[in-house]
Amino acid sequence: MSSELPATSGDWNAESAARLSVQDRLAAEALIVDVDGYEGPLDVLLTLSRTQKVDLRKISILQLARQYLLFVEKAKALRLELAADYLVMAAWLAFLKSRLLLPPDPNEEGPSGEELAAHLAFQLERLQAMRDAAARLMARDRLGRDFFARGSPEVVERVRKVSYSATLLDLMQGYARIRTRDEFRPFALDRDAVYTMEQALVRMRSMLGFAGDWGDISTYLPEGWHDDPAKRRSATASIFAASLELVKEGKAELRQSGLFEPIQLRRREPRE
Amino acid sequence: MGEQERMVEAVLFASAEPVSVAELNARMPHGCDAAEALVHLRKRYEGRGVGLVKTGNAYAMRTAADLSFLMQKETVETRKLSRAAIETLAIIAYHQPVTRAEIEEIRGVSVSRGTVDQLLEMEWIRFGRRKMTPGRPVTFVVTQGFLDHFGLESARDLPGLKELRSAGLLENRPPPTLGIALGLGDEDQDGAVDENQSELFEE
Amino acid sequence: MGEQERMVEAVLFASAEPVSVAELNARMPHGCDAAEALVHLRKRYEGRGVGLVKTGNAYAMRTAADLSFLMQKETVETRKLSRAAIETLAIIAYHQPVTRAEIEEIRGVSVSRGTVDQLLEMEWIRFGRRKMTPGRPVTFVVTQGFLDHFGLESARDLPGLKELRSAGLLENRPPPTLGIALGLGDEDQDGAVDENQSELFEE
């Protein structure tokens, strides 16, 4: 389904075209859109019914049926492919039209043409009512546009953090802890037995280039950090942390065959 | 100012979402009566820059709508809804609980899955109870989030609801089609069988 | 209630961040005096469940501190801020602007990148000006969010060492030294071993 329906207002009803006002013609020309623009046959009927300029309750279904059939004829003439439901509606309206025009056959079963027409009118009115309701709904004051919720809701996590994890007291105690330590202990001594992760990273980065095959990470311990238990522990921990960091960066791989087994590392070949 | 009023005020202020009376009571010390405190609080905030708003069975603090001009910074761009989505939403709101087939009957076209998905995703609609008709189709209803967004206390406060109802436009009037029109296979005119089928095909 | 008071109330309520007087004035219609409206508003909320709070040079609405117990139910999960992070944060607050080297100097251990990143991410610290020393290192300062969170008007309001001592927060005895502290860079020297481990698990 594509392109446009170059119909003019006159096409709908040639005789009355001359009598149509400019406004009527504009309304009718609203139909000159591709069929995709319509939300189904009922939408087309509703649009067509506006050209009648009357209350939907007093609409002439007969006239509407004619207009719709013309609309479909026009589309066919332009060799536009109409969706099946448009054609089904056309057939149904043709049937309705004949029922409305012909004198009622007393032997015929089923609802009268008037009943069918009344239901179609009801459907159109109901659809129009829903459209109006939708428009009114969307025009209401709306959250985030016209009225607003609390901009900084005191959520959950944050509130918890106040009471639990980082209170002013924590902060001051933390500070006090450091200052007290400072007053009594020269920190320089501590660093002796500390091999930082940064140091470990620098060391491992420079060595990584040669680690093509799996090797125990303990082999990365620096000289002189093997014997003193405190120093060895510090260096081991940092080497391990640095290994994890390298893995995170995608530069190395780690493996361990089981609990407490040696941890092995090798360089990871860059993927290209 | 009553202590309970203070508490309700604090809880509602702290939350961006509406808070139900039950939850208020649960959070306040035992023996408190949130409902009564809410009455006082609502009065206290009358005519102010923010006010107490009821939405569904919950309450929330919201800024006064006449001050929206101050809030350019806070305005959130809502995703633009298609015409189909807006109409579908209105039909669900006014006809709820409503089945997909009923929505299609009203709009005269099939409801695309994307439309329903979008509304579900925005948490403006949700599934309601299954209908006790053949095939037991699922129904859709609007959510509290919908009420909150459109500033409605309840679905009964939808604009024009009474008029629509008294005009009979919210009725599910069965089409007077029997026998003859069936041959045309018109889905819109037809009853339960087609309804169920369209659901089958789409799901 | 003054119209300007209503406006300030609504803006402070809806804003995600504390708002300065200058911004209030910029957002309100020409000729409004936000500062004056704030005075009235502050008075109006005295003793209520929420109150007007000044943080830095900006204003925000906060629930009353004595009602914080009401927010408990909303809590889902929290991660405790690690000791390393608290200490780093404290040092930044007390010594700002301070470089990483200076923090390490004070703490006696190196500061891990993760700790600084976490604090930056929480928006409790930010980068300050570079120091005019060799290498022009960056400095860290605390943010408005930090002041906001800890209910401080400015970092200068933090109690000094003397006050800490008189409040009993400063232990006069050095904590026992455990020479075997793990050297994971960011660990405390004086903490018990299990504390260090819990830090490992928390980060």
Image: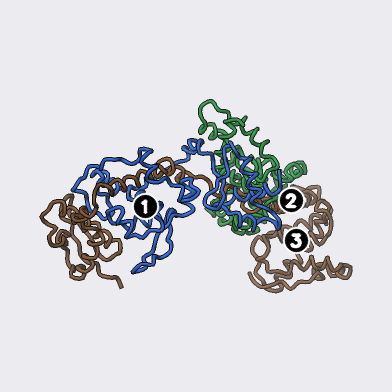
Chain colours: A brown, B green, C blue
Q: Amino acid at mark 3?
A: Thr
Q: What is the spatial separation of the Cα atoms under label 2 and label 3, in whole angstroms?
A: 14 Å
Q: Is residue B132 left or right of residue A232?
A: right
Q: Residues within 10 Å of mark 2 (few under 14, many from 20)?
A: some
Q: What is the spatial separation of the Cα atoms under label 2 and label 1, in whole angstroms?
A: 67 Å
Residue where numbered disc 3 is placed: A47
Query: Residue B36 placed where, x, y %?
Result: 62, 29
Residue C104 can be seen in this image: yes
Q: What is the spatial separation of the Cα atoms under label 3 and label 1, in whole angstroms?
A: 72 Å
Q: Residue at x 76, y 51 (%)?
A: A125
Which of discs 2 and 1 lies nearer the camera? The answer is 1
For residue B65, the mark is none
Query: Residue C183 placed where, x, y %?
Result: 22, 53
Residue where numbered disc 2 is placed: A129
Residue where numbered disc 1 is placed: C91
Q: In the rendered structure, the residue with mark 2 lies on which chain?
A: A
Query: Residue B113 placed where, x, y %?
Result: 56, 55
Label 1 secondary element: helix
Q: Amino acid at mark 1?
A: Ile
Q: Which numbered disc flags the more N-terminal residue, 2 or 3?
A: 3
Q: Is residue A106 left or right of residue A39?
A: right
